[in-house]
């Protein structure tokens, strides 16, 4: 019996807005033959191409100041175009140069702060992210996993769930506009969740304050499958972990509940704490741990530098984005991805090209599910190539003891990020949040109240 027969649970934790080079570009492994495609040589970005070609080099940093980046870099479609091609509206031909990161971030800053554009070139020493680094050194890191779309959170998460965003390329931020879209296309595409249910297999979305996956209309009849994150530990203790568990991090900070999604300007250390908690919780039930695959993943790069040019991709369907006409035929920027299981090797690097549709493609292959969602997941590489013939004994435990101490969580206030505004709009559209809620303080109070509600069965 091999891994394909023995693994009965897939747990995906998808965090927010970090590039591979930023978090894992300086990763070193015990076996010198195992090397990530990381940061080496004289890598840089010009200040403002083509006018000012002064190079801004990649900076390896051990300063805790990089835990919080405020404001966060741009990562909408036009921003990513500039970061990759040094042009906000490039001709869709040729290889990206990855030369516009500094210029793009500088443009977002106030004139007196333009020198801060170089902050997107700051890449973390492994000691700053001990949880992610420890998992990479003890399991398998995928160093060519790309976002599915050169754009923001929503379309990338839709690709993971559905193999397509159905032409959707934006982050819905205005409740009124979102409400008009919410009950119509493009939120009605089939998902991997339904594929599992058709085969009698189980799934759960574990979330904290807002579940972005609930934007997918076809999941509404299964609202009982959306559970608070606290239920994750209870389900594991009771031996009731579903076949597929998808975990959404906390996106808002409320008193006593700091955001842990790692979306700037949120503190990276809170996300490290969440990763450790998911791992430690899974390890707490050895019978479940021995039959599980955990994937730590990021939805997109968040505007931070990465040196690897994203490749072309199979278009999922005939849908094209408006007004750009983008055909969803090239991938977004590279993101961190780690496979965690007793069925994968320690300190191994997989150089295979993956994107987020590799998750549903892998699940379909592992559990014999019929029909691909789209042409994209049908063409996606699957991670089972990393499975060992026999499970190994893993001694790594109690990751929480390695979590770096985070600063005190903010009390609330301040402007909402585009992603937070989109979640607030979703909450308003489904009637969970009053339409009068004006901003971060009100949203944080709602999040706190939600967290204090009793868990529904």
Image (tube, helix red, strand yellow):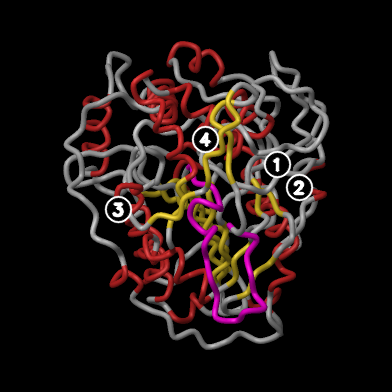
Badge 2 vs badge 1, beta-carbon distance below 8 Å: yes
Residue 130 at x, y percent in the picture? 39, 66
Looking at the rendered image, the disc whose residue lies closer to the viewer, 1 or 4, is 1
Provide the residue designation for mark 4.
220
Q: What is the quadrant of residue 152 in the picture? A: top right
Q: Nearer the viewer, residue 268 or 422?
A: 268
Residue 434 at x, y percent in the picture? 29, 19
Looking at the rendered image, the disc whose residue lies closer to the viewer, 4 or 2, is 2
- The numbered mark, 3 or 2, whose residue comes first in the sequence reads 3
On the picture, is 117 further left or further right than 100? left
- The numbered mark, 1 or 4, whose residue comes first in the sequence reads 1
Looking at the rendered image, the disc whose residue lies closer to the viewer, 3 or 4, is 3
- The numbered mark, 4 or 2, whose residue comes first in the sequence reads 4
| Residue at the image position 56 percent from the left and 20 percent from the top | 183
Badge 1 vs badge 4, beta-carbon distance below 8 Å: no
Provide the residue designation for mark 1.
163
Q: Magenta span covers which residues? A: 17-39
| Residue at the image position 55 percent from the left and 44 percent from the top | 299
Badge 3 vs badge 1, beta-carbon distance below 8 Å: no
Looking at the rendered image, the disc whose residue lies closer to the viewer, 3 or 1, is 3
Q: Residues within 10 Å of mark 1 (few under 14, many from 20)?
A: many
Provide the residue designation for mark 2.
377
Provide the residue designation for mark 3.
64
Q: Nearer the viewer, residue 119 or 17?
A: 119
| Residue at the image position 58 percent from the left and 38 percent from the top | 45
- Whether residue 386 is visible, yes or no, is yes
- Whether residue 216 is visible, yes or no, is no
Q: Main secondary structure of the magenta part?
A: loop
- The numbered mark, 2 or 1, whose residue comes first in the sequence reads 1
Magenta-span inclusion, residue 18:
yes
Magenta-span inclusion, residue 409:
no
Residue 279 at x, y percent in the picture? 42, 68
């Amino acid at each position: 019996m091999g891994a394909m027969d023995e693994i009965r649970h897939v747990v995906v934790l998808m965090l927010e807005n970090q590039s591979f080079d930023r978090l894992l570009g300086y990763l070193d492994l015990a076996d010198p033959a195992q090397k990530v495609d990381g940061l080496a040589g004289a890598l840089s970005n010009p200040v403002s191409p083509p006018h000012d070609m002064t190079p801004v080099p990649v900076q390896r940093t051990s300063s805790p100041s990089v835990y919080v980046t405020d404001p966060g870099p741009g990562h909408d479609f036009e921003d990513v175009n500039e970061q990759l091609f040094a042009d906000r509206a490039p001709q869709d031909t040729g290889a990206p140069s990855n030369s516009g990161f500094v210029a793009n971030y500088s443009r977002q800053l106030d004139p007196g702060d333009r020198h801060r554009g170089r902050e997107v070139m700051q890449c973390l020493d492994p000691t700053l992210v001990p949880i992610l680094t420890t998992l990479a050194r003890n399991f398998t890191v995928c160093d060519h996993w790309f976002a599915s779309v050169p754009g923001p959170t929503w379309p990338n998460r839709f690709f993971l769930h559905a193999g397509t965003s159905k032409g959707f390329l934006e982050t819905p931020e205005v409740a009124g506009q979102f409400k008009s879209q919410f009950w119509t296309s493009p939120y009605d595409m089939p998902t991997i969740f339904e594929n599992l249910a058709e085969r009698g297999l189980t799934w759960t979305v574990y979330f904290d304050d807002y579940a972005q996956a609930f934007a997918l209309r076809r999941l509404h009849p299964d609202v009982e499958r959306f559970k608070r994150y606290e239920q994750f530990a209870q389900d594991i203790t009771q031996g009731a972990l579903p076949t597929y568990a998808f975990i959404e991090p906390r996106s808002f900070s409320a008193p006593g509940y700091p955001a842990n999604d790692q979306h700037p300007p949120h503190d990276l250390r809170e996300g490290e704490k969440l990763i450790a908690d998911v791992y430690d919780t899974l390890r707490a039930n050895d019978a479940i741990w021995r039959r599980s695959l955990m994937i730590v993943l990021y939805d997109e790069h968040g505007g931070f530098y990465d040196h690897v040019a994203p490749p072309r991709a199979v278009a999922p369907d005939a849908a094209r984005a408006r007004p750009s006409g983008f055909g969803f035929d090239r991938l977004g920027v590279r993101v961190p991805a780690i496979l965690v299981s007793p069925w994968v090797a320690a300190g191994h690097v997989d150089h295979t090209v993956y994107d987020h549709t590799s998750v549903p493609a892998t699940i379909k292959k592992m559990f014999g599910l019929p029909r691909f969602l789209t042409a994209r997941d049908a063409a996606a590489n699957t991670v089972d190539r990393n499975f060992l013939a026999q499970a190994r004994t893993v001694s790594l435990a109690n990751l929480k003891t390695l979590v770096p101490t985070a600063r005190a969580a903010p009390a609330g206030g301040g402007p909402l990020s585009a992603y937070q505004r989109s979640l607030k709009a979703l909450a308003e559209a489904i009637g969970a949040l009053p339409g009068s809620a004006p901003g971060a303080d009100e949203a944080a109070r709602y999040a706190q109240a939600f967290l204090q509600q009793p868990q529904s069965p």
